[in-house]
Image (cartoon, helix red, strand yellow):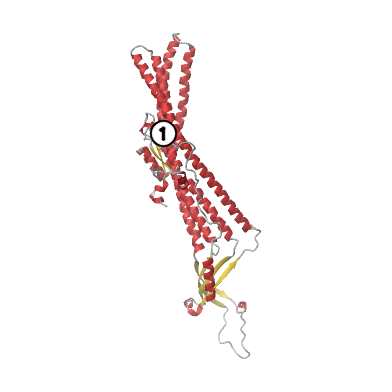
Amino acid sequence: MQKIYLFLCTILLTSCKVGPNFHSPAAPKATLYNKGPLITKTVSASTPAGKSQHLHYNRDISNSWWTLFHSRELNSLIEQGLKNNPTVEMSKANLHKAHANLLFVAGPKLFPTASTQFFGSRERNTLLATGINITPLPGQKLPFTLKNQFDLYNASVNVSYSLDLFGGNLRQVEALRAEIDYERFELEAAYLTLTANIVTTSITIASLQDQLKTTQDLINCQRELLRITTNNYNLGHISRLDLLSNENRLKKTLATLPSIKDSLARKYNALAVLVGSLPSESHHINFTLNSLHLPTELPVSLPSQLVRQRPDLRSAEAMLHKASAEIGVATADLFPKFNILANYGWFSTTLSNLFNPMNSVWSYGGQIAQTLLKGGALRAKRKMAIAEYEYAFAKYKKIMLEAFLDVADVLHALEFDAELLQAQVNVEQNTRARFNLIANQHQLGKINYISVLSAKEAYLNAHLNVIRTAATRYNDTAALFQSLGGGWWNNPQNKE
């Protein structure tokens, strides 16, 4: 007995985990996101959305980055979305399921399994059926009476334990823990996508509302201009070509109105769904683009930090970890399985006497099982696991490259958005100054009213371009925070 215990202890101490030990992929050695000079400051323009933005590299990101837009209504929408969005609820449920699955699988794999049973029966049998032949000697009688009907009761406790000598069970638990990490970062990705979508959808709605108002002003201006030119044409003061030119401009502007209204309705419906409501329950957004605050101090993570901060990259890494552990599981299946079994119980023909020490029975032992022939299935399974790892690694690399592309593109966009807005504001200011000058001259009787309306038309068109460019700048600023991971690691619940 002592030799058996020493043998088992030796096996346990020398057990190992077959398969590769996982290490997180190394971060790229790049120090910049783009070629060329480092972008640290954008140009400015004299409009609320035209402030200069300063980019601070190696500065941390707030996990509530949307508050930098200084909009209570926007903050309220995001709070509502985080509570009610079904995609977030689905991700939470998947995370809970992954935790439960770990407990379901890991318990029997890592710890002994114990069970108890009790049964009672009424049986009819003969001793010959049991293999026992009792025949009295000639001239003698048995000192007891043989009965072929009797009661039988049994109570027992069974214990079994799988000796994980090659680490297959530990690798399986490792894979399940990686699955939890995957679902955890999928939840963070759902949070990030939701908050970014609410911000950009709200900005787009504010932009479309401003565009709709300005377009209606432009239509009113063009209608008045067409009315005057029509009268002049009827009087023979202008050519039909001039009249058709004014009609064409009005029709072009009118043609844009349904598109703006359709886009606005669709965005309101999308926002309602994002915050967990029906499209019919969407409510009006009161803020305008000019009421939003453009974040001017922008934190930018270093390239070496990005791989630890993007939820999609961490999810891909978790799947890579799981694939690595599955190689260990498949490798361990090539080796024998060792189990320890033990049983203790009681047998009796009377229930009242069941637990008498004289009725106790017990057994213990070990079991070794090894698959000898299975048509190469086990080795094929290991090859499949290796292929899954190679696929997961390639997918991780793809997501990593796309992550760096996202940041590189949005950094360029912030620079060019500022330059475009500056140019658009300059045009708007020039057309507004020209309009004011012509309006003053009209009041002095030096210029006709048609010139005033034409100048106003040019100004409103320039203002529309400013609205669109400002919205793009706000949205690209939100895209920067999303591309950098959204600061989820600064949530106290996520401290690693």
Q: Find residue 86 and report its horizontal and vertical position in percent.
A: 45, 45
**Is residue 333 shown above or below 181?**
below
Instruction: Tell me the residue at 59%/53% (across/down).
Output: 386
Instruction: Tell me the residue at 56%/84% (across/down).
Output: 145
Horizontal side of 239 relative to 367 (left or right) equals: left
Q: Amino acid at mark 1?
A: Thr
- Residue 141 seen from this side: yes
Residue lying furthest bottom in this view?
A: 139
**Is residue 463 shown above or below 78?**
above
Q: How many marks?
A: 1
**Is residue 78 shown above or below 216?**
below
Residue lying furthest top in this view?
A: 236
- Residue 278 seen from this side: no
Q: Find residue 54 and report its horizontal and vertical position in percent.
A: 39, 37
Q: Find residue 411 and report its horizontal and vertical position in percent.
A: 45, 37
Per the image, the residue denoted by label 1 is 42
Residue lying furthest left in this view?
A: 444
Instruction: Tell me the residue at 62%/58% (across/down).
Output: 378
The residue lying toward the viewer, choosing from 302 and 68, is 302
- How many residues crowd mark 1 within 10 Å: few (<14), some (14–19), many (20+)? some
The residue lying toward the viewer, choosing from 372 and 362, is 372
Q: Secondary structure at mark 1?
A: loop
Image quadrant of residue 336?
A: bottom right
